[in-house]
Image: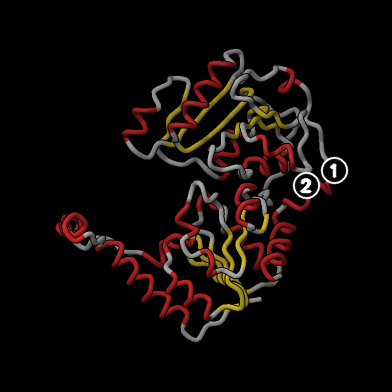
Amino acid sequence: MKILLIGVNNSGLVLPIVEEMRRQGHEVCYLENGEISRYEYLYPAERLLNSLAKGVLGRNLKRERRWLATTQFLHGFLKDRHFDLTILTNPDIYTAEHLAMLKGCSGRLVCHLWDSAGRMPGNLHCIEQFDRVMSFDPKDIRERGFTAVTNYAPATLQPLAADRPLEGDLFGIFSFDKERYRFICQLLDANPQLMIRIMLLADHKRKVRAASDPRVEVITKPVVGEALQAISSAYRAILDVGYASQQGLSFRFFEALAQQQKLVTNNASVKAYPFFNSQNIHCLDEAALAIPPAFFTTPYQALPEELIRPYRLPSWVSNLLELMME
């Protein structure tokens, strides 16, 4: 099958999907959103000109030029091409005209949302253009009729040794968000006896200043891949703090599942999944954030492979493509 996948390779999570699709025999072309819509100010005065145009004329010249750049790119790229399946993960930058161009050279046009509608409402502005919309968020699936999917467990992850050297009880790494930061500080207050390491990615000086709690380690560059794995695996459990506007399970759940590592989360929707086990996953109640020490001292309860297999990348990709082509 010929597949065109267009999205954003945040944290390196899209490229493994592309590689697995190719391993399964599909011809896959991957395009980054930024590659399609790239536009930068050509000279400093152009930024001022755009500000004036927005204030006086109500026009965003940079947005207009990005639209033109996207249109020109798609015209050139799609000429004399046809795909059995085209997948978009972040459609918010595309207009109805752009989606019509993609649909015209595709057997099926599918949207695979990696964010909830509550977090990224812009993804819905032309959602009716798609033949199918996939979502990992239970609320969007229930209210909008999207097709249910999950995130996946990377193929590189293996069960952690039970006797591995440990540095602490709980580790979490997150991008800075005021709501999330408040929750984390309350969690630290409620569990002073635990060895907890929290890393917060702050990409602006204002966020660095806001994350002032000395118990939180502020970083300005992402930590990913093997570097992150080396840190997280040295803790008994990993921490997941989701957004109030998003109920879907993050990648942390599936990484923990593959590694057989305990997880602490404020997302109680995990209780509806077949792999939920209270000995492995502790759900936080904001009214009672203290975590029982026994959760960390009791061993991880291994799960049957048939519960884990659907979330491993090879099975996940096969199932995803079947759903997209229905």
Question: Quick check: 132 left or right of 261?
Answer: left
Q: Where is residue 220 in the image (x, y as percent from the top left)?
A: 40, 37
Question: Quick check: 106 left or right of 26?
Answer: left
Query: Is the residue marked by circle 1 packed among few (<14), some (14-19), or many (20+) residues within 10 Å?
Result: few
Which element is circle 2 on?
A: helix
Residue drawn at (48%, 62%) of the image: 91
For the N terminus, the image quarter is bottom right
Which residue position holds label 2? 308
Dots 1, 2 in contact, CB < 8 A = yes
Residue at the image point whose x is 66% and y is 66% from the top: 21
Judged from the image, the secondary structure of the residue bearing numbered disc 1 is: loop
Q: Where is 126 relative to 101, above or below? A: above
**Frontmost residue, 317 versus 234:** 317
Q: In which quarter of the view is residue 196 placed?
A: top right
Display colour scheme: secondary structure
Q: Which of 59 and 200 is in front in this view?
A: 59
Q: Mark 1 points at which residue?
A: 304
Residue 221 in percent (x, y) is at: 42, 40
On-image quarter of the C terminus: bottom right
* Three-letter code, disc 1: Pro
Q: Residue 72, image x and y in percent?
A: 36, 76
Distance from the alpha carbon under mark 1 to that under mark 2: 7 Å
Residue 202 point in image, percent of width and height: 40, 36
Q: In this view, does 154 lie to the left or right of 96?
A: right
**Viewer-proximal residue among 147 and 62:** 147
Image: 85 above or below 112: below
